[in-house]
Amino acid sequence: MRFWRKVLAITWKDVLSEFRTREIIFSVLVFTLLVIVIFNFAFGGGQDTIQMVAPGMLWITFTFAGVLSLNRSFIIEKEEGCLEGLLVCPVSREIIYLGKMLASLLFMLSVEVVALPIFAILFNLDISFQLVVITLLTTVGFVTVGVLFSALAVNTRAREMVLPLLFLPIVVPLIIAAVESSGLALSGESWGEIASWLQIIGAFDVIFLVVSFWVFNYTIEE
Amino acid sequence: MNESIPLSSALEVWELTKTFGNNRALRGINLQVAYGDFLIIFGPNGAGKTTLLKILATIMKPSSGEVRIGGLDLKKDTEEIRQRIGVVSHQTFLYNNLTARENLEFYSRMYDVAEAGQRIHEVVNTVGMATRLNDRVGTLSRGMQQRFSIARALLHNPDIMFLDEPETGLDQEALPMLWQSLQNEGQGKRTIVMATHNLERGLELGNRLVILSGGKIVHEQTGADSDLSTLRKVYEETTKQ
């Protein structure tokens, strides 16, 4: 109980701070919507073409939006001079990791909740429950890895550059699985057809959650 | 460990070293601080004051040596030590977009402070900032932020406080308030270890003084051992090399 109280205290602090500044959500949402609109003009042709490129467009957009959002997770702590304050608190590093992860998950889901319907309207596609599940699971995978690398990058000089360099190669399997499963979901395929890709996404989430939990202590400490 | 050192020491440091690549920031520091002591660490820039305090505050790991805080081993009992210490740095560790109250509530949860609301009122009264509790930290002056930072460090009623140049960036109006707050917290109530450049204030506040230079303790005395001019002379001589 105490564990989760502290996790939620970190999440609450990040959410409240973001609510006051709208620094992450606003910039990421603007970026996401701009990319979707640009893709809409670029591939505004027939429905067949859109059906083919839509999953790729969706996940390129969410991936780079994710990088933007996750980059800020620990940079804000560093810029405000609060990272050391957080580190001297008598809490395990797993608490800090989970608190930050939940906050990043909320930020990314908030952007996706707005972006996904706009994407569907502009490209004349249906949002199925399957697509919602794929988006949710993939986003969990993104933040699981992203928060870990955000903590690693924050102590480097070119921290804004380091995160995508570390993060993107690791999440390639996740992006491929998300694109493939989203393509099937947008084509109206059944759960059975999507299941194998969902298993890959689920396995990625579990493996990297365990690994991140395990190694976070080493990335955040000096 | 040396048998002559009493177990009741608030802080014991043995042969502490810290290296950054080829740079040896600390070269075998030995230090014992009794409960209730107000230890002042003087030293020029680059002497190793901040590195020493960061190690004692569990922010940084030593390269070698042993540190015991309240009888606990810094390497093994890190989380327990963190519960017993309060840290004030040049940085306030306060979030600019949250109010002072929200910041203190956040740290109360992190430190498991019982009856947090009441404790917050106690500590802000100690630093004389009760009227600004609902202001966003970013709108407060540096001096006010630093006083809230002291309140933050006192929230969980730590046995030992580490202060790293808490006067940094404060104006002439804010400095006396800071020194007054520290004087109130000293007087044997808790153990305080503070690094500062201000010889005059350090001499006034501390009952023990050390001078750090080139990563080593080059001089050690009690507060009553000398006046300001003598201390200044000793400081200049010992930090010249």
Image (cartoon, grey):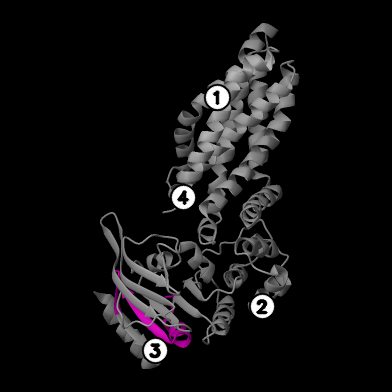
Q: State whether residue A138 is above or below residue A49.
A: below
Label 3 sits on residue: B228
Mark with earlier residue (3, 2): 2
CA gap between label 4 and label 3 equals: 45 Å
Frontmost residue, B26 versus B199: B26
Looking at numbered disc 2 in the image, what kind of residue is underneath it?
Gly
Label 1 sits on residue: A200
Camera-near label (4 vs 3) is: 4
Looking at numbered disc 4 in the image, what kind of residue is underneath it?
Asn
Label 2 sits on residue: B128
Q: Quadrant of the C terminus of chain B?
A: bottom left
Residue A166's x, y, as percent? 45, 35
The magenta stretch is B195-218
Total numbered badges shown on the rendered structure = 4
Q: Quadrant of the N terminus of chain B?
A: bottom left
Q: Chain of mark 4?
A: A
